[in-house]
Amino acid sequence: MYDQTNIFAKILRGEIPCKKVHENDHALAFHDISPQMPVHVLVIPKGPYTNLEEFNAGASLEEMGGFMRAVAETANLVGAAQSGYRLIANNGSDGHQEVPHFHVHILGGRPIMGGMIKAQD
């Protein structure tokens, strides 16, 4: 069940401000409040999807396409597309998903060494 009180739902409703990077009909992209890299942007769908499974099962093809377009356009807007970036979608408690709203992290701005970024404790 989708939690309408989660921070991303509040951001989408305009109850909490964000440092917006990009927006289209299906997604909103904004800077992470605790960046782990020089570029750390979140892209969230505007629909009420808790995780990837809900997004896959409930989003229309138009929503999915609009979301993925927003991810690519955002990476370009923040300058990460030129040198490369990593996309991360944490899913569920074992995947370290902290906000129960499906989202993708765009990480870049410097080389990512070792293949993994340590999650904050």
Image: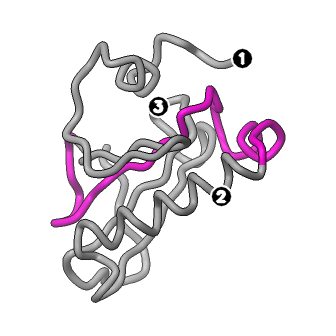
Label 2 or label 1, whichever comes before in sequence order: 1
Q: Residue 35 in the image: x percent, y percent?
A: 21, 52
Seen in the picture, residue 18 relative to 17 is either above or below; the reply is below
Q: Amino acid at mark 1?
A: Met
Q: Which residue is mark 3?
A: 99
Q: Amino acid at mark 2?
A: Gly
Q: Which residue is mark 1?
A: 1
Residue 42 shown in magenta: yes
Q: Residue at x 23, y 75 (%)?
A: 79
Instruction: Judge by depth and name the residue closer to the eye, 92 or 11.
Output: 11
| Mark 2 vs 1: CB contact within 8 A | no
Label 3 or label 1, whichever comes before in sequence order: 1
Q: Residue 113 in the image: x percent, y percent?
A: 31, 84
Q: Residue at x 31, y 43 (%)?
A: 121
Q: Secondary structure at mark 1?
A: loop
Residue 71 vs residue 37: left or right?
Answer: right
Q: Secondary structure at mark 3?
A: loop
Label 2 or label 3, whichever comes before in sequence order: 2
Distance Cα–Cα, label 2 vs label 1: 24 Å
Residue 25 shown in magenta: no
Residue 65: numbered disc? 2
Magenta stretch?
Answer: 33-60
In this rendering, which labeled residue sits more in front, label 2 or label 3? 2
Q: Residue at x 41, y 56 (%)?
A: 105
| Mark 3 vs 1: CB contact within 8 A | no
Residue 112, picture quadrant: bottom left
Seen in the picture, residue 120 relative to 77 is either above or below; the reply is above
Instruction: Tell which residue pokes out farthest to the bottom in this image.
Output: 83
How many C-alpha atoms fall within 10 Å of the one at disc 2: few (<14), some, or many (≥20)? few
Distance Cα–Cα, label 3 vs label 1: 13 Å
Distance Cα–Cα, label 2 vs label 3: 22 Å
Residue 117: numbered disc? none
